[in-house]
Image (cartoon, rainbow, N blue to C red):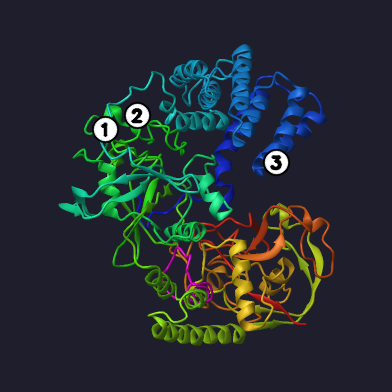
Amino acid sequence: MKTATEPRTKGYFPEVYHSVRILAVVCALILSSCATGNNYASDYYVDMVKKGVDFLKQEEYKEAIKAWEAAQAANPNSDAIAFNLGIAEEKLYNYAKAAYWYEKAYLIQVKDGVSKSSAGLTLTSVQAARNFWAAGEMDKANHYAELGYKHYREVGYDSLNSEGKPDKSQSNKIAAESAKELLDGLQSIPLKPVETPVMKSGPANKKYVNSLGMEFVYIPKGEFIMSDVKGVKQKTALAEGYWLQTTEVTQEQWNRIMGTNPSIYHGRNNPVEGISWDDTQKFIQKLIDKEKTNKYRLPTAAEWQYAAQAGTGTEAPFGSDKDKAGQYEWFNYNSGKRTNPVATRHPNQWGLYDMLGNVSEWVQDARADGKHFDLGGTCYGEIANLSSSNYHVDHPSTASFRDTGFRIVFSASFPSEEDYWYQKAKESDSLDDIKAYFKKYPAGKYRDQAKKLSEKIEADLKEIISKLEKDMVFVKGGCYQMGNTFGDIDITDAKPVHEVCVEDFWIGKYEVTQRQWQKVMGSNPSGFNNGDNYPVENISWDDAQEFLKKLSGMSGKGYRLPTEAEWEYAASSGGKAEKYSGGNDIDSVAWYDKNSDKQTHPVGQKKPNGLGIYDMNGNVWEWVQDWYGEKYYGESPKDNPKGPSSGQKRVLRGGSWFHTSQIVRVSCRNWGKPAFRSNKEYGLRVAFSSK
């Protein structure tokens, strides 16, 4: 069961974590093919292989396909190339094409006797099976699933290599471990027809569909046995009926309202995930504005549990017969350890799909400490978690990594529109929301309260803006050597070291705090919500731009992010040879993995650097203005470089509380897509030009 304090999965750079297992498989197969005679035919072939690996690492799958196809044309008998083509096609949801290449890789391996250890054969057969299944070719899916079981039973670290000797190599170990992980979810392929359950009578005949195509079923009032977060059960009565969405909100529905897709496991009809409770409120508000009704909301915990039980008197639609769980829900035994399209298992007795599996679901309720609940099991969870009483707790601004979504209620029971808009403004503490209330209700019943609230917010904003301006540090321009001047570790994108000159500018003495962000934006997205003076985190580059736009409008100053060259110049105390911002003693100047206690800390507690600036290394990564270019240092202009003219990723600098001393240093670079929010690691520092 996940809790608010459970660490989320992380990698060196969080955004590319999901490529790690793919790359391990790629490396294992390429090493295997090289060891068994699939030698490179030419320099061209080698170049195409390298490009294919690079494009896979960068998640540029269309370009990867071009490179792998060229490599395959040069060597059509390479199982590794075919396997990589399968990976790239799968990432673009071209399941039929992916299945073709996985099948080809498998057949090449069998023909050439590439993998007597069965590790490679296991991987390719399982991948082929899953993709044939996704493409609807069930006979082939079943065939390769059975082969996967066969080869998996033969996999082991002492398996034989191509010479018939025990293979202790790292590549075989990686392949075997990957095979084990992949096969954990092999039962997602239905080897036998799924039994159609007998559906009990219920309210499913009454349905409502909104303008977005969201389908709702009417849930009548009634009594049931409800469990609280501590497992205490009591009889509970719902006095009114309500309309509940039949499926979890899909990625297509989310994208049509929000214009983005934060999900890890992409699929038009897969549930949206990677969202916080606060994100659900933004979606609901935009849906309310679109449909011009204020009757959408999250279900309460009572409403959700009542609907999940569907009048059965049990906490799951399959009752105590766990052998039937896979007919109703996606969980670790049958999901492939990823989300699956909604409404592809059987609905419960009231016509609701995936109530207990696929993703857990946010509900309206919160604890006294402000943390919110989500309920149900997930695609990773055990069968024991497929229960209406399976609670989890998270901070409302914490974006789930990949296992929490939601469904919504259309309800006749709701506060009046004026009550709603005033309460929204009061809770957000946002001047924009107060203005929205006055615009709708200039002579409303909350006019006096709203005026006092507006005056308080304006006074707070004035104080915030004044302190921000007071805490700006003037940086006298100059020239310096940009890049890894120490040369003690290999930071490939921080070389060559080159001379850069920057003009005068101003930069924040501290990282932007949660209080500053809250007052300007009306919300706090931070995962470590420990106090006003902690750095804001969990923000994207796009979020930072919105903050800077609002801050500039309120203050009359042109606040912006520093350029990457300005950031490094300021971090190195004005271009000095410093490994860390303020010297070479990391513990005195930075919060990092050895001293952070795995969390952020209030700004300004460590020693400042030579310019009087705090926390430029550690605490949180800081977004800068530039597009990221891995080889940009080799072509950067000398004067005021501003990064590549375009790109797909923005630069982050400084390292965070999570990273080691080799990452938390002045010269290290990171990147993220503009809309990507890290798990409690990405923040910002403001700047403005001197002129």
Q: Amino acid at mark 1?
A: Phe
Question: Label for residue 318?
Answer: 1
Q: Considering the whole magenta stretch, tell me its main secondary structure.
A: loop
Residue 521 falls inside the magenta stretch: yes
In the image, farthest residue toward the left: 235
Task: State the CA–CA distance, disc 3 to disc 2.
Answer: 40 Å
Residue 302 falls inside the magenta stretch: no
Span colored in magenta: 515-534
Q: Amino acid at mark 3?
A: Asp
Question: Label for residue 54?
Answer: 3
Q: Are marks 1 and 2 in contact (CB under 8 Å)?
A: yes
The relative height of residue 490 versus residue 555 in the rendered view (above or below) is above
Q: Amino acid at mark 2?
A: Gln
Residue beneath label 2, please? Answer: 327
Where disc 1 sits, the SS reads: loop
Residue 360 lies, in percent from the top left, at 37, 47
Q: In front: 569, or 244?
A: 244
Residue drawn at point x = 22 percent, y = 40 percent = 311
Residue drawn at point x = 65 percent, y = 80 percent = 610
The C terminus sits in image quarter: bottom right
Instruction: Work out whether mark 1 precedes mark 2 in sequence or the reverse, and give the earlier one.
Output: 1
Q: Residue 66 appears in which quarter of the rendering?
A: top right
Residue drawn at point x = 47 percent, y = 68 percent = 524
